[in-house]
Each structure stands twice: as structure tokens, then as C-alpha cells.
Image (cartoon, rainbow, N blue to C red):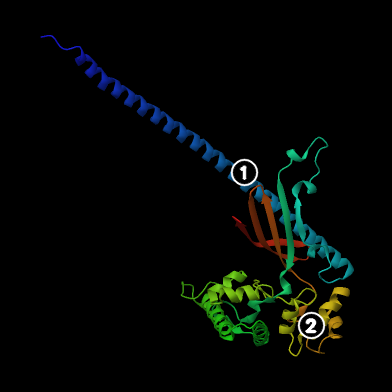
Amino acid sequence: MTRAPGHHRCRARPQRGAALLLAMLVVTLVATLASAAVWQQWRAAEVENAERQRLQAGWILTGALDWARLILREDARGNQTSGNADHLGEPWAMPLEEARLSSFLAADRENTADDVLEAFLSGEVIDMQSRLNFMNLVKVSGAGAAAKTEISEPDMQAFTRLYKQLDLPQAELTAAVDELVTTLNLAASDPMPSRTALTPRKLAHLGWLGIGPGSLAALEPHVAVLPERTTLNINTASPQAIVASVPGLDMAQAQRLVTERDRNPFKTLADASRLGPTGQWSELQHGTRSRYFEVRGRLRLEDAVIEERSLVVRNNLDVRVSWRERIAGR
């Protein structure tokens, strides 16, 4: 039987269509694989870049912390020699405004701005004894299972006055202190886990005791959480903290005290007694020297901003880090 000539053309068209479809599928597959490979390569480069930034930031901020510790140690050495107190006119109290990192480095003459890491550093050192210590609110007597935690009435009165100044709820303070007493009593006598809050180590941890975010923000310039009983440094404290710590002292007297100390920092509490109510300064609650400082560093590295806070404690010429935290993603 003889087939019509058009019959072969009809069979060829589906074959050509299938071949074209197969070619398009192959091209699509190759493009997909190529795109995936490019994406994987880009992702690996981004991860490597982020890790490099993290390591660089870590070294730079560690160096900044060590530099701050050195300044505090040399300040302690100078105070031992001169007998001076800690005050806001000393080198450690001067904040570092944002500056390019290359300004701190000794670069070769051949180096250009393009050869230097694009990093900008800023920071400050804050005297944490310029603030009322929340842990002063409790006092512990005895040791071991016989230990007993009680409220320190003079400090409770000081915090009550501060709460009143800042227009914060007194019930919040009372409940937080009661919770802290319960926590410490159980920690001393019962090794098993309990429903009570953990012992706070930072101001933010006071939220565990029931102090709200609004109160924490208002208290932050005037209150600290330190691991042992500390005195309030009247050379660095805010007027609000001074008024709260001294019964009978009003804001006008505190402002006068601040003005006077800015001109002539007080070496002893006796120097301040000339300006405040006689007999109201207590060596248990007030002082003119500090041991606890917070070092804050901020690094802007390309498009990333990394901040770090560290609490350091100074014992004579030994300056050690108590805790350190990093804040990223800003």
C-alpha cells in the first residue's frame, strides 16, 4: 500500500516537538543548577564575611575593654600616690566619641585610606557606684544553713525616697524586695529548685522580681545591681540619687553639692559635710571612691553595628571583668 507523502511530515512534527521540549527542559535544569550553585557560592561568601566581621569585632572590642581596664588601673595607681578621690574630671570619665579605628593605629607611610579597615569605635566608662545599689536593700547575717536575709531599713528608706521622686509605684518596690528576700533565704537553706526568681546580676534582671519595663527605664540612671554591698560615690552620683540617700536633703542642696564637686571634687565625706546637713553622711552608705565600673563599647563595622557592655571591678591595681554581654543587630 502506498502512503501519502504528508504522512511522514505528520510523524516528524511530534518528534521535533518532543525534542524541542526536551531541550527546553535540559536548559531549564542547567539554569536551575547554575542558579543554585551561584546562590550557594553567594551564601558561603556572606557567611564567611559575617564570621570575619564577628571575629574582627570581637578582637577590636576586647582591645577596647583592655584599654579601659588599663586606664582604670593607672587611675588607681595615681589615686594611691596622690590620695585623690574618683570623680568625673578624671580621664576614665571622658567618653570616646565615634572615631575611625585607623586614628588609633600606627600605619605605614605607604598605607592609604583604602587599605585600612572601615571601622568606627566609640565608648564610655560609667561609675556604677554613682548609682544606688539594689542589692544593698538586703543584708545577710550568719552563714550556711543558719544564714538569714533581712531588709536593710536605711536603704529601703533611700529607695522609697527615690521611687517617690520618680513617681513610681511604691507597691512595686515593696513586692520586689520581699521577693528578693525570699529568693536569698531559700538559696541559703534549700538546695532544690524553687518557684522564686533567680538572684539578679544586672538591672534588667530586676524584671524577674516584678519591676516593670517603665520603672526599669526610669531607674536606670540612678540604680545599679552589684554583687556586694557598695557605697554611693558622692563625686559621681546624680542629684536624685544623692537626695534619696540622705534624709533631709532637698534637691536645691543636692544641686549645690554637684556644682561644688565639679569645681573641687570631695576627697572625703568631711569635705561634703560643709554643704549638706551635718551628720547625715554615712560611711556605710557614702564614699568618694569607686570599685565598680561599666565599660561600654560601640563598633560600626561596614554595615553592622555591635555594642558591648562589661562590668569590671577594681581592687587596688587589679581590674577584672565580672560579666560581659554583646548587643548586635542595630
Tell me the amino acid under the disc marked 2.
Answer: Ala
Q: Front-most of 10 and 141?
A: 10
Q: Position of residue 280 (x, y in %)?
A: 78, 88
Secondary structure beneath dot 1 equals helix
Q: Front-most of 329 and 12?
A: 12
Residue that protrudes farthest toward the left in the picture = 1
In the image, taking residue 33 as reference, residue 281 lies left or right, namely right
Q: Which mark is residue 254?
A: 2
Q: Position of residue 210 (x, y in %)?
A: 53, 77
Q: Residue at x 24, y 16 (%)?
A: 9
Secondary structure beneath dot 2 equals helix
Q: Residue at x 60, y 42 (%)?
A: 49
Residue 281 shows in this picture: no
Q: Position of residue 128 (x, y in %)?
A: 71, 70
Residue 79 shows in this picture: yes
Residue at the disc numbered 1: 52
Vertical arrangement, residue 315 with respect to residue 150, above or below = above
Vertical arrangement, residue 143 with respect to residue 113, above or below = below
Q: Position of residue 140 (x, y in %)?
A: 61, 80
